[in-house]
Image (spheres, rainbow, N blue to C red):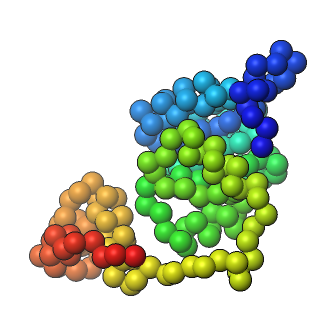
């Protein structure tokens, strides 16, 4: 990947364009400033609709998309951004990553998938890694997480969706509140 800082320093060169989509205002503003300091022309959106409007007005070269957005999720946004601009390169961000979601994101066209917290350097490295040819299945040495680990991640994802309300999370999970509290008090299972 061409170094965006070098591109921005030349007077004839146009800064690469990047769309940042995250509903966390503080994270979005900080990441925007960091990317601008690295020579990118940044536009930022808090949700799906705002991102689509920005992309239709001026299709970006790159996009950083949070998985969890209000109303429509980041996977839908990746799909629709690629319909608007087929050459866009997208990195998916999430605080609640799973292997299935990462696979879904790459199948939809994302070049990479990384977990939060991520800074500008992590994201740019993810774009660089996404430029390399994909590995074949025989090249991948993958150890599946244990069922206990997957359950623990799911419980914590549902709890976060409920704003930390244990009673509501237990209702959504279909388990008793005390059972959920025991599971939350237990040490997280290892990978």
Q: Position of residue 100 (x, y in %)?
A: 55, 73
User: Which residue is outermost to the left?
Assistant: 178
Residue 45 falls in image quadrant: top right
User: Which residue is outermost to the top?
Assistant: 11
Residue 25 falls in image quadrant: top left
Q: Is residue 82 above or below residue 52?
A: below
Q: Position of residue 30 (x, y in %)?
A: 48, 30
Q: Is residue 34 above or below residue 109?
A: above
In this orientation, which residue lies closer to the viewer: 114 or 179?
Answer: 114
**Residue 41 shown left or right of residue 142 in the figure:** right
* Quadrant location, the N terminus: top right
Residue under the point 16% across and 70% down = 185
Residue under the point 68% across and 36% down = 18
Residue 84 shows in this picture: no
* Quadrant location, the C terminus: bottom left
In this orientation, which residue lies closer to the viewer: 122 or 110?
Answer: 122
Q: Position of residue 120 (x, y in %)?
A: 56, 38
Residue under the point 76% across and 19% down = 9
Q: Report the number of numbered marks.
A: 0
**Residue 15 shown left or right of residue 123 in the figure:** right
In this orientation, which residue lies closer to the viewer: 56 or 148?
Answer: 148
Residue under the point 76% across and 54% down = 131
Residue 96 shows in this picture: yes
Q: Position of residue 152 (x, y in %)?
A: 32, 73
Q: Is residue 175 above or below residue 117?
A: below
Residue 58 falls in image quadrant: top right
């Amino acid at each position: 990947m061409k170094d965006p800082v070098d591109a921005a320093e030349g007077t004839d060169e146009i800064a690469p364009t990047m769309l940042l989509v995250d509903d966390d205002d503080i994270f979005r503003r900080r990441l925007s400033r960091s990317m601008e300091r690295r020579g990118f022309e940044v536009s930022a959106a808090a949700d799906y609709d705002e991102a689509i409007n920005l992309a239709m007005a001026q299709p970006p070269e790159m996009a950083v998309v949070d998985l969890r957005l209000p109303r429509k999720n980041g996977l839908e946004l990746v799909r629709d951004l690629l319909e608007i601009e087929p050459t866009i390169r997208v990195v998916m961000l999430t605080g609640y990553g799973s292997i299935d979601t990462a696979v879904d994101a790459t199948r939809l066209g994302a070049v990479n998938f990384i977990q939060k917290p991520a800074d500008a350097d992590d994201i740019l490295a993810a774009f660089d890694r996404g430029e390399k040819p994909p590995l074949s299945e025989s090249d991948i040495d993958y150890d599946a997480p244990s069922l206990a680990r997957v359950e623990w991640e799911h419980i914590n994802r549902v709890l976060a969706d409920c704003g930390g309300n244990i009673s509501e999370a237990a209702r959504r999970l279909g388990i008793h509140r005390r059972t959920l509290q025991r599971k939350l008090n237990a040490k997280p299972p290892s990978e």
